[in-house]
């Protein structure tokens, strides 16, 4: 097993044993299993998936939306220091849609590169939140 620690500026969001953790990186989604080679990489806004046991089906994977951060793996422990992280159960889909619309408006009216980058980051975060709600809805139908 692998100890997965998910830490945000607000505190520890998750710290438990897991068989596999799926993370969004700049080069795509990666899977971390026990005894993974040491690794330090960036996490980008997207979906984190946690499979607690090897025989857990995909429908039992626990999901978080993340705003990105830094990943450190040493083979026994995986630590993600994330800007933001929300568990699937804590995401209000309607509020995420409204936040996405506001971020898209900010992007359209951005007057400089900083405002554009901030709006784009908000869009990416809210798209990740909505993707997690979609995954949750699909798994609830099963």
Image: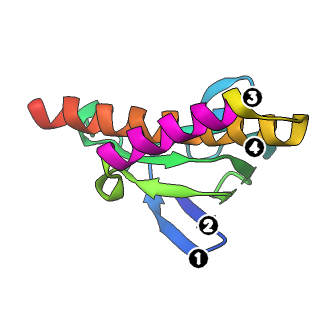
Instruction: Give x and y (percent) for residue 44.
Output: 68, 38
Residue placed furthest toward the top? 27
Residue where numbered disc 4 is placed = 118
* Magenta-colored span: 93-107
Residue where numbered disc 2 is placed = 7
* Quarter of the image where one finds residue 133: top left
Instruction: Give x and y (percent) for residue 132.
Output: 38, 38
State how far apart marks 4 and 3 are (Cα).
Answer: 18 Å
Between 62 and 66, the residue placed more toward the observer is 66
State how far apart marks 1 and 2 are (Cα).
Answer: 6 Å
Instruction: Identify whether 109 is placed above or below 19.
Output: above
Q: Who comes first in sequence, dot 2 or dot 4? A: 2
Specify few, some or many for label 4: CA neighbours under 10 Å numbering under 14, 14-19, or 20 or more.
some
Contact between marks 1 and 2 (CB within 8 A): the answer is: yes
Specify few, some or many for label 1: CA neighbours under 10 Å numbering under 14, 14-19, or 20 or more.
few
The local secondary structure at tag 2 comes to strand
Instruction: Identify whether 113 is placed above or below 86.
Output: above
Residue where numbered disc 1 is placed = 11
State how far apart marks 4 and 1 are (Cα).
Answer: 23 Å
Between 55 and 135, the residue placed more toward the observer is 135
State how far apart marks 1 and 3 are (Cα).
Answer: 24 Å
Q: Residue at x 56, y 48 (%)?
A: 66
Specify few, some or many for label 2: CA neighbours under 10 Å numbering under 14, 14-19, or 20 or more.
some
Instruction: Identify whether 53 is placed above or below 138.
Output: below
State how far apart marks 2 and 4 are (Cα).
Answer: 22 Å
Instruction: Give x and y (percent) for residue 114.
Output: 87, 42
Residue where numbered disc 3 is placed = 26
């Amino acid at each position: 097993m692998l100890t997965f620690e998910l830490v945000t500026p607000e505190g520890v969001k998750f710290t438990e044993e897991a068989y596999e953790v799926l993370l969004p990186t700049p080069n795509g989604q990666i899977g971390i299993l026990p005894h993974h080679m040491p690794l330090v990489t960036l996490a980008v806004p997207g979906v984190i998936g946690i499979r607690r046991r090897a025989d857990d089906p995909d429908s039992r994977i626990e999901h978080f939306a993340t705003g990105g951060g830094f990943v450190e793996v040493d083979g026994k422990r995986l630590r993600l220091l994330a800007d933001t992280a929300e568990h699937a159960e804590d995401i209000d889909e309607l509020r995420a849609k409204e936040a996405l619309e506001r971020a898209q408006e900010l992007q359209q009216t951005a007057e400089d590169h900083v405002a554009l980058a901030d709006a784009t980051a908000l869009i990416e975060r809210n798209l990740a939140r909505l993707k997690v709600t979609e995954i949750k809805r699909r798994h609830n139908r099963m």
